[in-house]
Image (cartoon, helix red, strand yellow):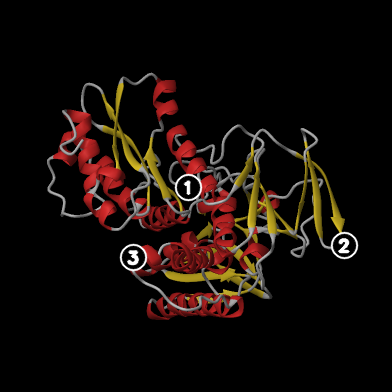
């Protein structure tokens, strides 16, 4: 008899779990309160932000770089309405694509709020569903600040920052993490003055320090203003704009504030406490290595459990859970989950950072290669950044990779795969790479980790 699986949440984790479970023969129902599947990622996160990052960078290149390539035109215009219209069309197309996959795999999609009644029953709107297994994949919501109320007019969340119908004169971004830096990049390229207010002593504090510093320098060159070791004490609304005061009594007047201080798991209304599903003090659902909660047939994946809040992490967990339900051996290697910041240059990392290697006491070697010595980067006037590899001093096993450069997000997959296959830096160095490509910088950094970079 086919298993009945009910998944709550149609984001990347939920819908990928649904597709894999359906492939394995389950009867799958997926519930989400949004009319369009795809979750935060598709509707108000990963996809719309990347679309605007792409469009704004094309505008930035046309404004600042085309002339030196011999490309000229009489007048460059910016149509914000069209910018937003094409973004919405992309989201609609992708949403329809997911709906097509649901139909193709006989997955039932219900647009409703969900409540777990017990380990075998879920209420979807007014309908009661039975289930052999339940998967919670409800994602996360933006974290707010107690002294700053988001109204999506003067004070924005990441959602509001994606939907602006004009280019603000100046934006203060509270929080120097990847979401704020990406959205700041969009509006900086289109003409806004960006101020980033960060409580710590560096931006993107989760990155390897070398990447964080290089990204700081790159964005500062582009016009970002950084206020580090700073916290917002007060803010007051003016006739046109907002005035902020910092912990060092610095004042700043801007048109908009973007609150970008992270996200928190979203489990409201699921009835978890009454059912007996346990949570941590931080609000994450407690799970074991198979993503099972304390109730064996109720699982949780993605942003509602501990770990990096990344769409691809949720997808891997979704596949692993679907396969575990069917008794297959599957796991997620949490040591090899890449992270990307889609600024320009892009930043990508996987595995250990240098401070983490030092903290655990592993004997290691750090090797670098700059894109300024890469022929493809030279040919495309795109030489900012470097590849940094960390490898075990004795065995040569790759421990981590940190890349800053225009293609970093795509390049990091090569190193992630190498780490998954327990490859050494010499394995990478002796793998033939196509020429001329940016990925040759990985090969050169690997050579530097074994002997010496060829083009150093």
Mark 2 or mark 1, earlier in chain: 2
Would residue 381 be visible to someone looking at this image? yes
Q: Quadrant of residue 193?
A: bottom right
Q: Is residue 91 left or right of residue 242?
A: left
Q: Quadrant of residue 127?
A: bottom right
Instruction: Tell me whether circle 3 and circle 1 mark residues in contact (CB < 8 Å).
Output: no
Q: Choose between 61 and 114: the one closer to the eye.
A: 61
- Give the residue at mark 1: 291
**Alpha carbon separation for disc pair 3 and 1:** 52 Å
Q: Quadrant of the C terminus?
A: top left
Label 3: few (<14), some (14–19) or many (≥20) C-alpha neighbours in 10 Å? few
Would residue 119 be visible to someone looking at this image? no
Label 2: few (<14), some (14–19) or many (≥20) C-alpha neighbours in 10 Å? few
**Alpha carbon separation for disc pair 2 and 3:** 44 Å
Q: Position of residue 172 (x, y in %)?
A: 69, 51
Name the residue: 44% across, 64% down.
61
Q: Position of residue 445 (x, y in %)?
A: 24, 37
- Give the residue at mark 3: 69
**Alpha carbon separation for disc pair 2 and 1:** 50 Å
Name the residue: 52% across, 79% down.
86
Q: Secondary structure at mark 2?
A: loop
- Give the residue at mark 2: 239
């Amino acid at each position: 008899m086919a298993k009945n699986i009910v998944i709550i949440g149609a984001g990347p984790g939920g819908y990928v779990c649904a597709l894999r479970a359906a492939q394995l023969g389950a009867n799958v129902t997926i519930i989400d309160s949004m009319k369009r599947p795809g979750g935060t990622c598709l509707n108000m996160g990963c996809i719309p932000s990347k679309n605007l990052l792409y469009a704004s960078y094309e505008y930035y290149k046309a404004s600042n770089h085309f002339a030196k390539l011999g490309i000229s035109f009489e007048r460059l215009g910016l149509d914000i309405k069209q910018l937003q219209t094409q973004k919405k069309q992309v989201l609609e197309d992708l949403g329809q694509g997911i709906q097509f996959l649901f139909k193709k795999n006989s997955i039932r999609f219900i647009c409703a709020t969900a409540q777990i009644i017990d380990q075998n029953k879920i209420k979807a709107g007014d309908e009661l569903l039975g289930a052999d297994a339940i998967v919670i994949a409800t994602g996360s919501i933006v974290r707010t600040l107690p002294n700053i109320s988001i109204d999506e007019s003067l004070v924005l969340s990441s959602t509001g920052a994606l939907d602006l119908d004009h280019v603000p004169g100046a934006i203060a971004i509270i929080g120097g993490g990847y979401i704020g830096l990406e959205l700041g990049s969009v509006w900086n390229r289109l003409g806004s003055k960006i101020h980033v207010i960060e409580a710590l002593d560096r931006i993107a504090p989760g990155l390897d320090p070398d990447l964080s510093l290089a990204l700081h320098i790159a964005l500062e060159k582009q016009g970002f203003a950084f206020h580090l070791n700073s916290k917002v004490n007060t803010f007051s609304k003016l006739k046109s704009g907002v005035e902020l005061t910092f912990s060092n009594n610095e004042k700043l007047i801007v048109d908009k504030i973007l609150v970008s201080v992270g996200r928190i798991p979203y489990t409201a209304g699921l009835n978890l406490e009454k059912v007996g599903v346990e949570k941590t003090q931080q609000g994450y659902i407690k799970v074991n290595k198979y993503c099972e909660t304390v109730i064996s047939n109720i699982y949780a994946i993605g942003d509602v459990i501990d770990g990096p809040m990344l769409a691809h992490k949720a997808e891997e967990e979704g596949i692993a859970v679907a396969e575990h339900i069917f008794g297959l051996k599957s796991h997620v290697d949490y040591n090899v989950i890449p992270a990307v910041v889609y600024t320009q240059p892009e930043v990508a990392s996987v595995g250990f950072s240098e401070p983490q290697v030092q903290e655990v006491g592993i004997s290691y070697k750090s090797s670098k290669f700059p894109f300024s010595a890469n022929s493809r980067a030279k040919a495309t006037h795109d030489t900012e950044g470097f590849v940094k590899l960390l490898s075990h001093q004795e065995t040569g096993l790759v421990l981590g990779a940190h890349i800053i450069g225009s293609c970093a997000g795509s390049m990091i997959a090569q190193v992630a795969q190498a780490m998954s296959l327990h490859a050494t830096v010499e394995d990478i160095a002796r793998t033939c790479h196509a020429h001329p490509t940016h990925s040759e910088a990985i090969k050169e950094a690997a050579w530097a980790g074994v002997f010496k970079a060829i083009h150093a």
